[in-house]
Amino acid sequence: MNKIELRNIIREEIKKVLKEDNLTQQGLITLFNKKAKNKELMIFLKHSGKHRSLELVIHDEDQITSNKTYGHGTNQDGHEVDFKFSDVINARIV
């Protein structure tokens, strides 16, 4: 295996890792900043002990920047819910 082939394999592995880890705190901040003013950022959490497939809306950037591990959003009932960034499986602008 030559250096070019090895380099290409490493690049592909790095791309896979980055693609899997795109919903970190910084990723959510970037999505939040890209949204239009009349839109909301909605996140979807994987099943955890407390919640099952929970959808939360992020109204304010402070909800995702106040802590490095946890953020908080508003559920369908209007209650604030804390979540771990590692529990986010999807995010979209609605």
Image (cartoon, helix red, strand yellow):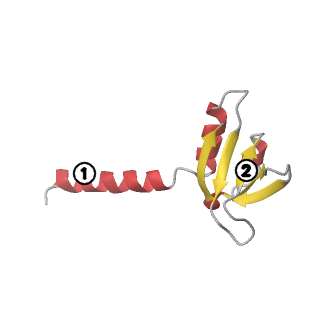
Q: Residue 70, image x and y in percent?
A: 72, 58
Mark 1 vs mark 2, foreground winner is 2
Kindly tell me whether residue 2 is visible in this rendering: yes
Q: Tell me if residue 3 comes above or below residue 40 in the rendering.
A: below
- Mark 1 or mark 2: which comes first in sequence? 1
2 lies left or right of 63: left
Q: Quadrant of the C terminus?
A: top right
Q: Quadrant of the N terminus?
A: bottom left
Q: Tell me if residue 82 comes above or below residue 48 in the rendering.
A: above
36 lies left or right of 5: right
Q: Residue 8, image x and y in percent?
A: 25, 51
Q: Nearer the viewer, residue 73 or 30?
A: 73
- Look at the numbered disc 1 and give the secondary structure of its residue: helix
86 lies left or right of 70: left
- Residue at mark 1: 8
Specify few, some or many for label 1: CA neighbours under 10 Å numbering under 14, 14-19, or 20 or more.
few
Q: Residue 89, image x and y in percent?
A: 58, 56
Name the residue rendered at 69%, 55% in the picture: 68
Kindly tell me whether residue 65 is visible in this rendering: no
- Look at the numbered disc 2 and give the secondary structure of its residue: strand
Q: Where, by quadrant of the figure, is residue 10 drawn?
A: bottom left
Name the residue rendered at 78%, 58% in the picture: 82
Q: Residue 81, image x and y in percent?
A: 80, 57
- Count of marks overlaid on the render: 2
- Check whether the beta carbons of the residues at disc 1 and disc 2 lie within 8 A of each other: no
Task: Say the numbered circle drawn on residue 56.
Answer: 2
Amino acid at pointer 1: Asn
Q: Marks 1/2: CA distance? A: 39 Å
Amino acid at pointer 2: Leu
